Amino acid sequence: MPKIYLIEGPVGAGKSTHAAALARQCDGVHIALDEWFAALFSPDRPSTEVIPWYVRRKERLIDLIWAHSQRILASGRDAILELGLIQRDGRVEFCRRVRDAGHDLVMHVLDAPLEVRRERVQRRNTEQGATFSMVVPDHVFEMASQLWEPPDEMECDESGVEWIGDASSAQR
């Protein structure tokens, strides 16, 4: 039975690289919110009031990705979703939506030390390689890093969390 893989962690943790490899491994479809967001909305980004603008669009995009994911699952393939749900409440809500629809769910959580993540993001900004979607300025990196809430014990139990790499030792 096809399943949803939810790939989460702070910015620069290696989520895109992991999700792409997982999609190849299980012949699933990888959907990265940042990629869709950059293509659809970045050209219209305002110069002020960016956070409320971003939040409204991200919510709509998550709904669109969810609808698309259900079509992927109906086709018999796994959906590997990288949604940037860095806070617990958003992840819990999305995971409940998946379970309420009767789908299997596995959450992979990645992390790495702050300085490693910062260096990865700076390198990705410069090289703009395979996992690049948009430039992440230093202040956005810092803000997103501070907002990251790793899954707690209850979320791990409810959402089938699998800690990938050194995330288990970094977060437990």
Image: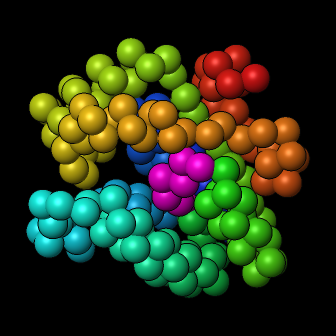
Name the residue rendered at 62%, 40% in the picture.
149
**Rendering quarter of residue 142:** top left
Magenta segment's dominant SS is loop
Q: Quadrant of the N terminus?
A: bottom right
Name the residue rendered at 18%, 61% in the picture.
48
Could you say which is closer to the camera, residue 35 or residue 77?
35
Evaluate whether residue 138 shows in this view: yes
Name the residue rendered at 12%, 60% in the picture.
47
Residue 11 horizontal side relative to residue 80, left or right = left
Is 10 situated above or below 113? below
Could you say which is closer to the camera, residue 94 or residue 28?
94
Name the residue rendered at 21%, 50% in the picture.
134
Total labels: the figure holds 0
Q: Quick check: is 81 in the magenta stretch?
A: yes
Residue 44 horizontal side relative to residue 58, left or right = left
Residue 171 horizontal side relative to residue 86, left or right = right
Measured as percent of width and height from the top left, residue 126 is found at 12, 31
Could you say which is closer to the camera, residue 92 or residue 15?
92
Is 25 situated above or below 81? above
Measured as percent of width and height from the top left, residue 121 is found at 29, 31
Q: Quick check: is 79 in the magenta stretch?
A: no
Q: Quadrant of the C terminus?
A: top right
Measured as percent of width and height from the top left, residue 91 is found at 65, 57
Is 135 situated above or below 110? below
Residue numbers of the magenta segment: 80-87
